[in-house]
């Protein structure tokens, strides 16, 4: 009897996913442990492995790339050697409305009306070997312009988004300069509720945090002059240098070692303290906000943190970040400094206890005795769950972190 290939649940509240592509061909032999297909879950794309062996049978009505699929839905089957399979039905015929006339699906469609284009555009099309019948005109009344003949170009982020959803971007019309295709031009498949599945997953997590935490936010303006100088030293000898987020991962982990209550997690069985300090950091991607996790941060040097964070960012923005890369964090960092934001109220990555928001680092006037001098300053915004920790311990953590930011050398350079 055929073994069905079904859609697994990749996240805690996943009900539907998006089918990305098959990794095996129809009729190919599959061994247990082979990767069968790619599935987009709540916030990542996973390569799904086979638990069984057999010959892959992909039925004619199997989901296509970009289709929404429910958890438990059957995508295909594994057959035993020699087991019969249902072949797809032959192409059907359809009538064209004339008296009993029948057109096979393989019959080429009738040629469209002569496209509207100026003589110069027609000349350019002949020189470039472009069939005007295949070009969609962007001018008035569908008139073909010189821009329509330009080679299709696409931004890197739009290309990744198209590839992740199996979309042929060469058929799209770009809204950018000279027809360049941008992210907004990619028709991302919609979930049954009308929003992209990744957006719905993010919304569900935000609501879970809102409904299950008692959030309080503390802010503190911190002297970051020495931190900026230390990073400049790294930039002089390394390319790329560790980012400010990498520095804050290292410094926050050191502060958490002194104040582990801020790394606790709320569970049904009570408050659980961490076995180690695995820290997440927010990454802006085409699919929305993702939070990959750097494991055992205190054991890593700053350069190792920088290498690992870049790897995770590449995976996240390439749509290849696995669920396991986002699980198990005990504390999260989100940096909006690049957008010119000073202070904000970050949302706790439930069931974690706290999240640290980092604002822009800006040179501002500061008092040095009776003198006014310029110092690099940054605003830190700590949101914590008041059910787990009180305000005073949270303030002490922020105070410890501020001291480390002001003098980052000993901590940042420690292994």
Image: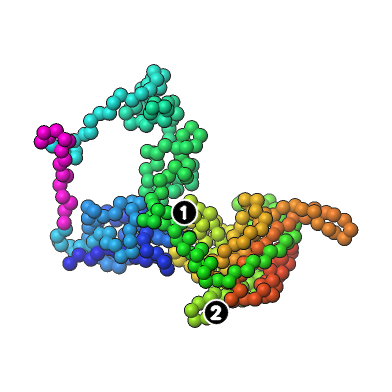
Can residue 409 be seen here? The reply is no
Q: Residue at x 54, y 74 (%)?
A: 265
Q: Which residue is mark 1?
A: 287
Which quadrant is home to the N terminus? bottom left
Q: To which quarter of the image does residue 353 belong? A: bottom right
Disc on the earlier residue, 1 or 2 = 2
Q: Which residue is mark 2?
A: 271
- Principal secondary structure, stretch drawn in magenta: loop
Tell me the tag on residue 318: none
Local packing at callout 2 (Cα closer than 10 Å; few below 14, some 14-19, many 20+) is: some
Residues shaded magenta: 86-101
Q: Compare residues 143 and 273 and report the one nearer the observer.
A: 143
Q: Judge the density around disc 1: few (<14), some (14-19), many (≥20) Cα neighbours within 10 Å.
A: many
Under circle 2, the secondary element is strand
Tell me the distance, in whole angstroms, between the alpha carbons under discs 1 and 2.
32 Å
> In the image as oriented, which residue stretches furthest toward the bottom?
269
Q: Residue furthest left?
A: 100
The spot of residue 293 in percent (x, y) is: 53, 64
Specify the farthest residue to the right: 370
Q: Residue at x 57, y 68 (%)?
A: 331
Q: Is residue 397 a member of the stretch shown in magenta?
A: no
Q: How many marks?
A: 2
Give percent across and percent down for residue 363.
Answer: 75, 52
Q: Is residue 383 left or right of residue 210?
A: right
**Quick check: marks 1 and 2 in contact, CB under 8 Å?**
no
Screen quadrant of the C terminus: bottom right
The residue depicted at 16 percent of the width and 44 percent of the height is 92
Percent coordinates x, y for residue 184 in the rendering: 47, 44
Give the structural element (helix, strand or loop) at label 1.
Answer: loop
């Amino acid at each position: 009897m055929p073994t069905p290939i079904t859609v697994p649940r990749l996240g805690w509240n996943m009900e539907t996913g998006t089918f990305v592509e098959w990794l095996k061909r129809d009729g190919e032999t599959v061994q247990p442990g082979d990767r069968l297909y790619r599935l987009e879950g709540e916030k990542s794309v996973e390569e799904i492995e086979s638990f069984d062996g057999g010959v892959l049978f992909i039925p004619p009505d199997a989901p296509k790339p970009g289709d929404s699929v429910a958890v438990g839905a059957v995508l295909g089957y594994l057959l035993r050697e020699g087991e019969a399979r249902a072949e797809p039905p032959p192409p059907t015929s359809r009538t064209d409305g004339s008296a009993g006339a029948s057109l096979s699906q393989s019959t080429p469609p009738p040629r469209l009306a002569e496209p509207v284009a100026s003589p110069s555009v027609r000349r350019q099309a002949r020189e470039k070997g472009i069939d005007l019948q295949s070009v969609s005109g962007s001018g008035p009344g569908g008139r073909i312009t010189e821009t329509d003949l330009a080679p299709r170009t696409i931004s890197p982020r739009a290309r990744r988004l198209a590839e992740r959803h199996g979309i042929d971007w060469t058929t799209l019309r770009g809204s950018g300069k000279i027809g360049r295709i941008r992210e907004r031009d990619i028709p991302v498949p919609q979930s049954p509720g009308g929003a992209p599945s990744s957006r719905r997953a993010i919304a569900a997590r935000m609501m879970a945090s809102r409904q299950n935490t008692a959030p309080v936010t503390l802010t503190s303006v911190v002297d970051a002059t020495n931190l900026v100088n230390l990073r400049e030293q790294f930039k002089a000898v390394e390319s790329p240098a560790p980012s400010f987020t990498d520095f804050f991962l290292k410094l926050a982990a050191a502060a958490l070692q002194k104040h582990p209550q801020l790394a606790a997690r709320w569970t049904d069985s009570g408050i659980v303290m961490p076995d180690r300090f695995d820290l997440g950091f927010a990454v802006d991607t085409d699919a929305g906000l993702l939070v990959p996790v750097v494991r055992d941060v205190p054991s890593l040097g700053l350069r190792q943190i920088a290498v690992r964070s870049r790897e995770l960012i590449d995976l996240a923005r390439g749509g290849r970040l696995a669920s396991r890369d986002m699980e198990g964090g005990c504390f999260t960092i989100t940096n909006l400094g690049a957008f010119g934001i000073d202070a904000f109220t970050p949302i706790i990555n439930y069931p974690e206890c706290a999240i640290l928001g980092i604002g822009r680092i800006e040179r501002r006037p500061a008092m040095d005795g009776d003198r006014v001098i310029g110092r690099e300053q940054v605003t830190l915004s700590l949101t914590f769950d008041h059910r787990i920790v009180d305000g005073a311990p949270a303030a002490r953590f922020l105070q410890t972190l501020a001291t480390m930011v002001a003098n980052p050398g000993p901590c940042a350079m420690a292994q």
